[in-house]
Structures are given as C-alpha cells and as structure tokens.
Amino acid sequence: MNLTVLGLSGGFPAVGGATSGYLLELNGRHILIDCGSGVLSNLFRFIRLEQLDAIILTHLHYDHISDMQVLKYAIDLTRKTGLDMPAIPVIAPGTPENIAAGLQSDGNLIIGQINANSEISMFGATVRFLPMEHPVETYGITVEFAGRKLAYTADSVPCTNLPPLLQDADLALMDAGTLERLRKPIMIHLTAAECAILARACRVRRLLLTHLLPLLDPAEILAEAAAQDPGAELARLLATYEV
Ligand SMILES: [Zn+2]
Ligand SMILES: [Zn+2]
C-alpha cells in the first residue's frame, strides 16, 4: 500500500495547504480517505478523477468533507466533456443527518453508511471502522493488506478503541490537533504527547502526526511528541509513504 498526504491541516488550511485528505493506493486502485478543503486540487497532482475508485469519510466535520461539494461539479463537468465517468462509491457516517443529506448526489455519488465496529472488504484489503470519541459520529479506520496495517485515528481524544486501532500498525496517522499546554477541561483532539505515548504503547512502527493546527508551530508539535517517542514524525504534505 502507498499513502499520499493530500492535506494535513486541522480546522482550516495553512498557507498553500489543505485540510484532511489522504490517497491510498492498493492493488492498483485508489481510495481517497477524507476530502477536506484543498484536497481535490492536490489529488489531481497524482491521479485523474476517473481513476478514483472510492471515498471514505471518517466524519462529517467540514475540514474532512468540504471538497465533496465541488467534487460533484467535477464529476458533472467531466461527463459534459464526453468522458465516461462512473458514480463514485462513498462510505460515510449517517450523522449529523442534515450534513449527511447534503452529501447526497444522485448519479454522481453512491453513499453507503458506516456501521460501528464493522469490517468490509475493499479491493482485496480489509477495512475496519472503530468508533472514536469526538463531538460527532466519527470512525477511526484500519486497512490491512498483504500482511501490512495502516491505522488512521481520524479526530479523537483517548478512548477504548484507540489501542486496538493502533496495535502493531506499520504506519499510523494520528490526530495531533493540540498540545499539552493548551489542555482544557473538555478536549476534542489528541495532544502530540498523547499520540506518541499511545503509538509507543501499541508498538506502532511509524507514527505520522497530522491534523496540524496552522496556528501552532510545527516544531513545537514535533518536539512535544518526540519527548515521548523519538521516532515520531510530522506528516509531510504531498509525500508518499509505503505502508
Ligand atoms: Zn478535523
Ligand atoms: Zn472533527
């Protein structure tokens, strides 16, 4: 499997950046995981629209889905140029219901709902969906293929499903949306330190910190994680990682 980072900003895009989006290539097929602001522009650096086989949305916060709306235009306009463009399967949570309803696009997208703790087969890989702890229905995902495991926390705070999600992952993408010095009574993202501690405890082979808030210094995020796990890395925009 190859994972390309199309967007790594949390909340809103950094200058020249994009919010959450990752392109997973497996078995010659292409799955887009999350589709935030600016992701489509970066996707087209790597593949054409008609090469996109499926989309997984971990949750319906706009920094993970905002480019889904212009994606519908892209599909329509591609067809108008005469290219054969099949509807794209999308797997997403069913709530919040008003936002889920806004995703619908007959003929362009085929929306399937994620069921908690479910497991599906995609292009020869096993994809699992584990409920995370976040203000809306959110799923962390694991993708297992050819003896390798990718784990993606989506957005979450520490919860009982994180250890099984991360356990023995070859590559883990973790929401490092905040820092220990910004800790509040109610949290909605992991701190960089929490990511590193969890990744170490779960024997993650390679930890990529992502969902980076553009208001923070990336060096500070990395330093906080590296104090717990010297192998921690910041995800790099447009980099491709072999899983
Ligand atoms: Zn987010
Ligand atoms: Zn979120």
Image: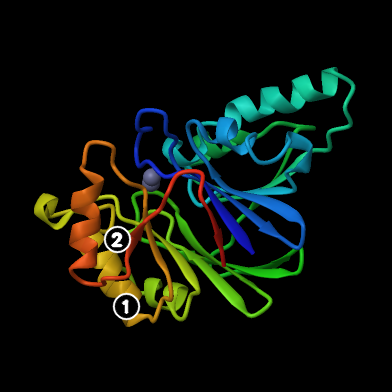
How many residues crowd mark 1 within 10 Å: few (<14), some (14–19), many (20+)? many
Q: Quadrant of ligand 1?
A: top left
CA distance separating discs 1 and 2: 16 Å
SS for tag 2?
loop
In this rendering, the answer to whether 27 lies above or below 87 is below
Locate residue 22 relative to residue 156 in the image: left or right: right
Locate residue 30 relative to residue 189 in the image: left or right: right
Among the 4 quarters of the image, the one containing residue 209: bottom left
Closer to the camera in the image, 115 or 1: 1
Q: Residue 82's spot in the image, x, y percent?
A: 90, 21
Q: Is mark 2 within 8 Å of ligand 2?
A: no
Identify the disc placed on residue 200. Answer: 1
- Quadrant including the C terminus: bottom right
Closer to the eye: label 1 or 2: 1
Locate residue 201 relative to residue 113 in the image: left or right: left
SS for tag 1?
helix
Among the 4 quarters of the image, the one containing residue 155: bottom left
- Residue displayed at 25% across by 56% down: 222
How many residues crowd mark 2 within 10 Å: few (<14), some (14–19), many (20+)? many
Identify the disc placed on residue 157. Answer: 2
- Residue displayed at 34% across by 37% down: 11
- Quadrant including the N terminus: bottom right
In this rendering, the answer to whether 231 lies above or below 77 is below
**Residue 102 makes an appearance in the image:** no
Q: Residue 104's spot in the image, x, y percent?
A: 66, 34
Q: Residue 108's spot in the image, x, y percent?
A: 75, 33
Q: Residue 227's spot in the image, x, y percent?
A: 18, 68
Q: What residue type is labelled 2?
A: Val
Identify the disc placed on residue 14. Answer: none
Q: Are marks 1 and 2 in contact (CB under 8 Å)?
A: no
